Amino acid sequence: MQESGTTDFHSNGLPSLLQTLISNRASLIKAAARITGCHSRAEDVVQDAFLRVSDMKIDTLPFNARLNYVFRIVRNLAIDHYRKQSMEQKYFVYDEHGLNSAPQVSNPESINVDRQTLGSVNDALLQLPERTRYAFIMYRVHGKQQKDIAAELGVSPTLVNFMIRDALVHCKNSLASAQLH
């Protein structure tokens, strides 16, 4: 039952491209997993392909071209997903100490832990020389550029970089020792 400009349906009522995707789901997931490197991400890619195919209005490809077309859709989506994941990993660095990330849960216990952590960081910052503390706060809290901080303090940008690094190391060490006690 195929007319010009209409969708080709199988006997079960599904468009042929959609049926091809469903029938070959396991193979499509394996193909996507080879690109994404993760089975669950590959399942997401195949789900995206399902949504894309289900939105298609015209489905008149010959039988042998349907599978190739569906594999091409999954392959392209998997590559896009991989590129997005690579870009996120490049720009969003994992922070093992949690100094660069916002808390994910806001229940009374986590709020208390966050307050204690902030108190420990504040205490650690108060132990630093005033100039180092200023450079760290201006850079990490206010987002000021190191060259601007250097100009304000009358020092080189390299020295500002070292002050910020030293302050960060001091804060990390203070947090680590506070967790031991």
Image (cartoon, rainbow, N blue to C red):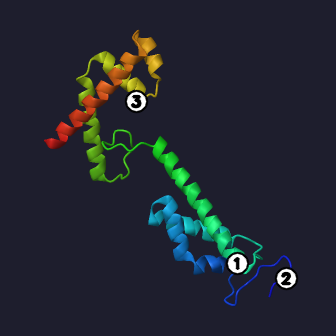
- Where disc 3 sits, the SS reads helix
Q: Which mark is residue 3?
A: 2
Q: Nearer the viewer, mark 2 or mark 1?
A: 1
* Quadrant occupied by the C terminus: top left
As displayed, is residue 1 above or below residue 94? below
Q: Residues within 10 Å of mark 2 (few under 14, many from 20)?
A: few
Q: Amino acid at mark 2?
A: Glu
Residue lying farthest to the front in this orientation? 64
Q: Amino acid at mark 3?
A: Arg
Tell me where residue 49 appears, x and y as whole percent: 61, 67
- Where disc 2 sits, the SS reads loop
Q: Specify whether 138 is left or right of 70.
A: left
Residue lying farthest to the right in this orientation? 4
Q: Residues within 10 Å of mark 1 (few under 14, many from 20)?
A: few
Quadrant in the picture for residue 137: top left
Mark toward the start of the polypeptide (3 vs 2): 2
Give whichever of 85, 168 is nearer the camera.
Answer: 85
- Where disc 1 sits, the SS reads helix
Give whichever of 10, 107 is nearer the camera.
Answer: 10
Quadrant in the picture for residue 28: bottom right
Q: Which mark is residue 27?
A: none
Label 1 belongs to which residue? 64
Tell me where residue 8 appears, x and y as whole percent: 76, 82
Q: Specify whether 67 is left or right of 131.
A: right
- Residue at 57% over, 57% down: 79
As displayed, is residue 129 above or below residue 105? above
Q: Is there CB contact under 8 Å for labels 1 and 3? A: no
Label 3 belongs to which residue? 140
Q: Using the numbered discs, state the Cα–Cα distance from disc 3 to disc 2 in whole angstroms.
A: 64 Å
Tell me where residue 75 appears, x and y as whole percent: 59, 63
Give whichever of 85, 114 is nearer the camera.
Answer: 85
